[in-house]
Amino acid sequence: MVHVEFLGPIQKEPLELEAQTLKEVADILNQDDELKEWLSNSAVAINDMLVSSLEIKLNDGDKISLLPPVCGG
C-alpha cells in the first residue's frame, strides 16, 4: 500500500492505493476527471525525492506527492 498526497491547489484528500509502480498509480489517478488536468502539469516526488520516470518500482509505505506548478509574486 502506498500513500498519495496532493499539495497546493489540488483539492483532494490523500489516498491509500495498492500499486507496484508509479505508472500504476498514474493509471488509477487518471480515472478521476478532476485529477487528469493536474497529472500532466505536476511534479512527482516519492518519499520527498523528485522523480521523472513512471517505471519506478514502489515499496509498501512509500509516500507519493503531487506538486502542482505555482506562481508567486
Image (cartoon, rainbow, N blue to C red):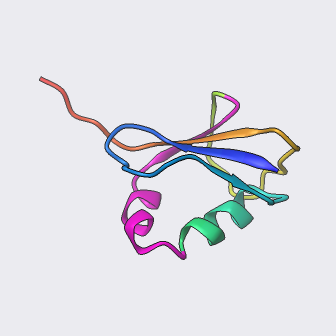
Q: Quadrant of the C terminus?
A: top left
Front-most of residues 72 and 10: 10
Residue 41 x, y percent position in the rendering: 39, 54
Residue 32 is inside the magenta segment: yes
Residue pictured at 44% horizontal, 38% vertical: 7
Q: Is residue 32 left or right of residue 15?
A: left
Residue 6 x, y percent position in the rendering: 48, 44
Q: Is residue 11 left or right of residue 70?
A: right
Front-most of residues 11 and 58: 11
Q: Is residue 73 left or right of residue 36?
A: left
Image quarter of residue 67: top left
Image quarter of residue 38: bottom left
Residue pictured at 37% horizontal, 49% vertical: 10
Residue 42 x, y percent position in the rendering: 44, 49
Q: Is residue 63 left or right of residue 14?
A: right
For this orientation, the residue located farthest to the left is: 73
Image quarter of residue 68: top left
Residue pictured at 73% horizontal, 66% vertical: 24
- Numbered circles on residues, count: 0
Residue pictured at 88% horizontal, 44% vertical: 60
Give the magenta part as a residue range. 31-47
For this orientation, the residue located farthest to the front is: 13
Q: Is residue 65 above or below residue 57?
A: above
Residue 13 is inside the magenta segment: no
Residue 40 x, y percent position in the rendering: 44, 61
Front-most of residues 49 and 19: 19
